[in-house]
Amino acid sequence: MSKKAKAEIWDKLAAHQKKLKNTHMRDMFAEDPVRFRKFSIDTGAVLLAYSKNIITEKTRTLLLDLLAASDFEKMRAAMFSGARINVTEDRAVLHTALRNVAETPVMLDGKDVMDDVKSVWEKMQNFSEAVESGAWAGFSGEKITDIVHIGIGGSALGADMAIDALKNFHVAKLSCHFVTNVDAIEICDVMRRLNPETTLFLIASKSFTTQETMANAQAARDWIVKHYEGDTAAVTRHFVALSTNKKAVTAFGIDAENMFPFRDWVGGRFSMWSAIGLSVCLMIGFKNFKLLLEGAYDADRHFEKAPPEENIPVMLALVGLWYRNFWDAPCYSVAPYASRLKKFPLWLQQVDMESNGKYVDIHGKTCKNATGPIVFGYPGTDAQHSYFQLMHQGTDMIPADFIGAVKSDHTVDSQHRMLLANMLAQAEALMTGQDSPDEPARFFPGNRPTNTLLVDALTPYTLGWLMAVYEHKIFVQGMIWEINSFDQFGVELGKVLADKILAEAEKGKAGKHDNSTTELFARCFKTS
Ligand code: F6P
């Protein structure tokens, strides 16, 4: 469809918003007893209930028109088929191949990428079983008791979140620790608490050049080598690498045999599905890891095949875009009503904000409309005692996603009922609001939108589903905004400047900077 047609639909949505501006969801519900059914999608694995949004059937039709005008079907097919849709880096975007449990061919440059994917699965399975059984032991022959995943950003957030989320599925008697920040307190804490002879380091870095990861990996390597009185042969038993950069991995002293590879068509923030997920695999066992992939695979098929109006990632994307572009909502909140999902908002923050935090479109032009929202969140009910006040009575509209599981992951049923009651109550309160003619401070405007995503229970399979739903949601929004959701040049400039300032700090003399940076440099590095 033409640019003009898309612009016309955009204008129609803006006009439609003006008409809806003073409509209250309370009235929409009063007028329509089957509103829930009209605005929900139940796939069996995940239910998306989106009736508590300021939308009508006309809104949905217009949003779906906008989707159609954005070449959705063509773009979706391009992603799944390995087209180089990451145009600025000239790369395919094939994280979906990593969870293609049906093992159907996925061709890239005349080669089926599934050959590599399957061989890495096999390697991950053999390795996790060997660590579990003790067949893989430390240099002194001691069984591994602790794994330390060293990585940052996409090379840590997904794995860290999934390991926490799936605590009930841990099979290994291992403890897992994450070291991400260049702040050495993290690696020092690990070295202080753990026994080098029973510790295995997983160095997770796509590039194997990231400052934070390499500094922490080097500190860990020194600790191991020192413990074995300078014997560098110990490195091969206490380190494995999850990376695309074989040269740098072997230069570090890790045997190529102990490298779990992946390819440049796996974006960092989508890499938990690749060898980067080895820590997850070690903790929950390969069988459960495969179920996690299977959940994401089924979500991929849903995204690929379900008609747009019955497609969870699509509707989540369109409703999100409705608020971002037509209601000036700068952010959205995600509150999982499941403590095990405490790190889900942190994972989502990177996937969404690193993907769609873009100012320039794929045509090289400044974006005319707002793009990626600010994402934040915390589990309910904790969040209710924190930032929910602003969601209820603040001056901004903050759309929210609530995520809940019908079955609990414990046996205290009464508390699970409390948890779910709170989730429903918050969505109801945000929607209905409260009149308070006598006490203005107790007035709640209501009309504040929420989506509820419900799974039967939090399992590897449903977690895989949920993660893939959000990944695809973000893709759909980026596609409509015509931005490249798969590069991340925004993280580069700060990295370059940090290297420059570090070199100056080591010399004890600041280079040319603005006055503020110069003064702060003097205080930080005591050069004056
Ligand atoms: O933050 C930028 C980024 O490139 C992320 O996309 C990536 O996940 C992270 O850094 C880590 O990079 P690497 O895996 O190469 O160490």
Image (cartoon, grey):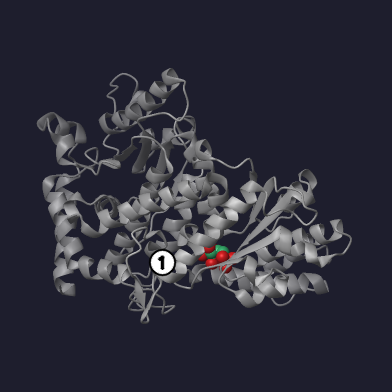
Which image quarter: residue 108? bottom left
Which image quarter: residue 357? bottom left
Secondary structure under tag 1 reads: loop
Q: Position of residue 351 (x, y in %)?
A: 44, 57
Residue at screen point 48% across, 51% down: 347
Q: Is residue 339 above or below residue 317?
A: above
Task: Give the side of residue 479 with respect to residue 386, left or right.
Answer: left
Q: Quadrant of the N terminus?
A: bottom left
**Mark 1: amino acid:** Lys
Q: Is residue 414 above or below residue 366?
A: above
Q: Position of residue 464 (x, y in %)?
A: 40, 49
Q: Residue furthest bottom?
A: 110
Q: Position of residue 130 (x, y in %)?
A: 62, 53
Provide the residue designation for mark 1: 358
Q: Is residue 10 visible?
A: no
Residue neighbourhood size for the residue with mark 1, other residues' Cα within 10 Å, grouped as few (<14), some (14–19), many (≥20): many
Q: Is residue 282 above or below residue 383?
A: below
Asked whether 379 or 102 is in front, the reply is 102
Asked whether 428 or 8 is in front, the reply is 428
Q: Is residue 345 visible?
A: yes
